[in-house]
Amino acid sequence: MTLRRLFVFDEKTRFMLALIAPAVLVLVLFQILPILTGANASFRDWHLHDPKKTWIGLTNYAYVVRDEEFLGIVLPNTFGFMFASVACSLVAGLLIALLLNRKFPGRWLVQTIILLPLMVAPVIAAIMIRWMFNDQFGIVNVVLDVFGIAPVAWLTQKWTAFFAILLTDVWLWTPWFALLLLAGLQSLPPEPFEAAQIDAASAWRTFRYITLPMLRPVIVVCVVIRAIDAFRTFDIVWTISGGGPARATEVFSIYAYVEAFQFLNFGRGSAAAVIGAIIIVVFAMGLYRVLNRWVEVSK
Amino acid sequence: MSAVAALPAARSPGFFEALAPGGRRALFVLGVIAVCLLFAFPVLWLVLTSLRPGYAVYYVHRGTDFTLDNFQDVLGQEIVLKALWNSFAISTLATILSLGVTVTSGYMLSRFKGPIPGAWFGAIYVFRCVPYVSWVLPLYFVTRTLGIFDTYWGLLLPHVAVHICFFSWIMKGFFDGIDPSMEYAAMIDGCSRWGAFLRVALPAAVPGLTALAILCWLYTWNEFLFALILTAQNTPILTVVMAQFVHELGMEWHLMSATAVLALGPALIVTIFGQKYVIRGLKI
């Protein structure tokens, strides 16, 4: 009886399983299977030039969590980058969404221009930024020169390189925030705003006490999605600074990549990737819960 | 005009009005122009670089020789033409496949409660967090084993896999916003579950689907890491070809920019015609 119930699903369950079957199939083959392969490698002595593949337990993990580079530079960089990038693009995106939510002549053109970064491949944007911040030929130093400021070797110092990376990320993702928040703003009911207008509430108070609370659910989803993506940023950091100078701007994806493909220690790189995945899964769950509670309370 | 009219009527004259009549409006216009410049500048710079002859490219801000030779050079290369077509085909196919696979999954997440949807949502949430670096290399081994490395399928299916988690989540939001009572009514009137989904829920979700389709197309068109690792010379992809113009030694900035501008064209068309639908569709 119980065995029968396990294998013969009722009509509703069959429908549910049929709905997700294609997605599950693709996910298992092209995401879960590779992730498990990588996780398996992280417990093994797996150098790409000498794949012995012998089981060595947690040695790779022990190395990564004790590595000064990982603890002292990579983790602070990754979290710093995540917070700065999400905060800046959220604020900028919100301001732009508020701007585009007003009616003014030429709004369509302004909107198209602001959405430009969405059309540019991140790797191209990164190459362009590297080009613009080039210490000899870059336009940024040319402009600084006009104002009498000595040229800066942007990409060969830690904080200036970090700034260039952050700038690229904010430039790339502000339109994304703006788009989602604008869609959110336009779906808000008009009545509370009319009431505020009748009560002659100031623009700031209308924003603070009506717009912001009503927009919170959208903001939460945007922030969680973006925070996860910012945590695993790879291509723009790799293209702009390559993690340099001297590994000073390495974020966690770069660390895993460098360990696996430059030091050719696939096992250790995989271990770093697994550690990063665990950190971000725990962090994302915590973030989602905190933000969700914040939304509930504000209701 | 309307920007000012939108402000509440009963207000004391603000700081800027006191400073100069119409000053508020001028400030607004200046602010808008500044923001536009900030967002457009890197793209403008790219276009400008692509119009410079090879010898003048290091001093884009100096001199006035402009040329279209770069575009001619680039379009004369067979690999660029092939890459343009491949990128277009892959983006379009990946969009169709991803939407087809995730619309049902999102519907399921939205309409059902219980252990199976719960487990599926948990899986999606967890696997969304796993960083690309940890599965891109094993993915290379997997596509090799399946014999689809460096083919359309070998790039398409991983792209679909990337989209599954995010899109299922967003689609759930779309269906959450659609009242299910119509589907119940259809089912009482004799519609099957599939009928209720295909004939009632799906048409109501079309604006959301359109928005996601546009974002998905742009994302795949611009994707780099997967294309770099999962393709070789048989399936050149535009972003990879572009990046190959920038080597450590010879940086062919003018050719790179010309290719990048070519890549921007279709994306620009999609965005100009699509932005209305994206904003309308993303109202979750």
Image (cartoon, rainbow, N blue to C red):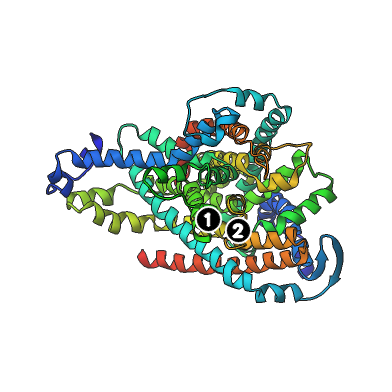
Chain letter for the residue marked with disc 1 in the picture? A
Q: Position of residue A285 (x, y in %)?
A: 55, 67
Please give left or right for residue B57 compared with residue A58 in the image.
Answer: left
Please give left or right for residue A32 compared with residue B20 in the image.
Answer: right
Q: Amino acid at mark 1?
A: Ala
For the residues bearing labels 1 and 2, Cβ distance under 8 angstroms: yes
Instruction: Please determine whether, in this image, residue A259 is positioned above or below residue B281.
Output: below
Q: Position of residue A296 (x, y in %)?
A: 40, 66
Label 1: state its secondary structure.
helix
Name which residue lies at 59% across and 59% down.
A245
Counting residues from the N terminus, which is met first, the one under dot 1 or under dot 2? 1
Please give left or right for residue A85 compared with residue B3 in the image.
Answer: right
Q: Position of residue A152 (x, y in %)?
A: 47, 52
Q: Residues within 10 Å of mark 2 (few under 14, many from 20)?
A: some
Residue ID for mark 2: A244
Q: Amino acid at mark 2?
A: Gly
Return the residue nearer the eye: B197 or B15.
B15
Chain letter for the residue marked with disc 2 in the picture? A
Label 2: state its secondary structure.
loop
Residue B190 can be seen, yes or no: no
Instruction: Please determine whether, in this image, residue B131 is positioned above or below residue B239.
Output: below
Q: Could you tell me which quadrant the C terminus of chain A lies in?
A: bottom left
Name which residue lies at 50% across and 60% down.
A159
Q: Position of residue B12 (x, y in %)?
A: 12, 49
Query: Marks 1/2: CA distance?
Result: 8 Å
Residue A54 can be seen, yes or no: yes
Return the residue nearer the eye: A279 or B209.
A279
Name which residue lies at 79% across and 76% down.
A57
Return the residue nearer the eye: B40 or B95.
B40
Marker disc for residue A161: 1
Instruction: Please determine whether, in this image, residue A113 is positioned above or below residue A159.
Output: above
Q: Could you tell me which quadrant the N terminus of chain A lies in?
A: bottom right
